[in-house]
Amino acid sequence: MTQPAVLAAGECHQHDQAEYVGTLAAACLHLEVRTHPKPGMVSHLDCGSHTDMDAALLHRSANVLRPYFSELWAAGRAGAGMAHLRRVGMAAERAMLAATSQVNTHRGAIFGLGLLAAAAGFRASCRRKAPLGRILARLWGRGILSGPVALHSHGTRAMLQYGVGGARHEAAAGFPSLYRIAIPALLEGQSLSPYDPESARIHACMALIASVSDTNLLHRGGREGLQFARRAASRFLAAGGVGHPGWRAEAQRMHLEFVERRLSPGGCADLLAMALFVRSIESEDDSP
């Protein structure tokens, strides 16, 4: 069946919304890359603890994923089940790997941001605007937990070895780390440094590192690496976070310490991008 040349008004509006959400999700991934210093992580200034990726690769990956986030928004708006969302996510992952020469740049973001994009699609069809996390947990929480597990992934191995819940359980619960940690820290960072948006992102990143059992940290550094990262981020926040006059030098020092230990809290980087996305979608409710 061929695509009609002219869309009806409602279809055109939905298409525009889907394009907007796909562009927003990709923009949040770009913003995460353009945030420095994030301890051990890739940014526009250096590659952190990574030898297989740089900022250019991450930006290319984010651009490739944009239409898939749009497709997930449309699927969510249509009330699609988890099986359909999973098929779109798998197609997005294949496109990512093809664009990055098989480097896993954004597998976690495809999962997390993809589910949130689908939740945003469902939310667009509702009169009452519930939080994206609540929608996600209600519609797809059971399907997330009952779906197939990537047994040979670093995250799965870390989950099994260290007995942590990981991204699947976090997603099935509606991403509580976004609402309890990341978004409040974003807002706090904005109040501490209102004229520097990057500082708010770093503040949120540090709050996540201090609290989340990041399976990337467990994979690279075991429990000792996770505890080292948590202590360092907690000290940064206890000293005033981005409200402290010397915070940027301290964050840079932490970054170099993480690189020396080859630690990279990639799960927290995904959560940071997701927090930016959720904050942007849900803050639209406050618009006049």
Image: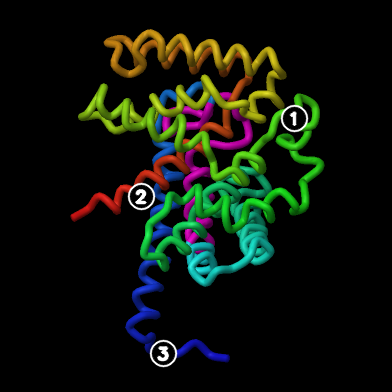
Numbered range of the magenta stretch = 41-69
Q: Residue at x 75, y 27 (%)?
A: 163
126 displayed left or right of 242:
right
Q: What numbered label is drawn on residue 158?
A: 1
Q: Quadrant of residue 129?
A: bottom left
Q: Amino acid at mark 3?
A: Ala
Q: Residue at x 77, y 52 (%)?
A: 148
Label 2 sits on residue:
282
Judge whether residue 60 can be spotted in this image.
no
Using the image as rendered, state which of residue 254 and residue 240 is in the foreground.
Answer: 240
Estimate the x, y position of residue 29 in percent, counting from the top left.
46, 44
**Label 3 crowding class (10 Å Cα cut-off): few <14, some 14-19, many 20+?**
few
Please say whether residue 43 is one of the residues in the magenta stretch: yes
Q: Secondary structure at mark 1?
A: helix
**Label 2 crowding class (10 Å Cα cut-off): few <14, some 14-19, many 20+?**
some
Judge whether residue 240 can be spotted in this image.
yes
Label 3 sits on residue:
5
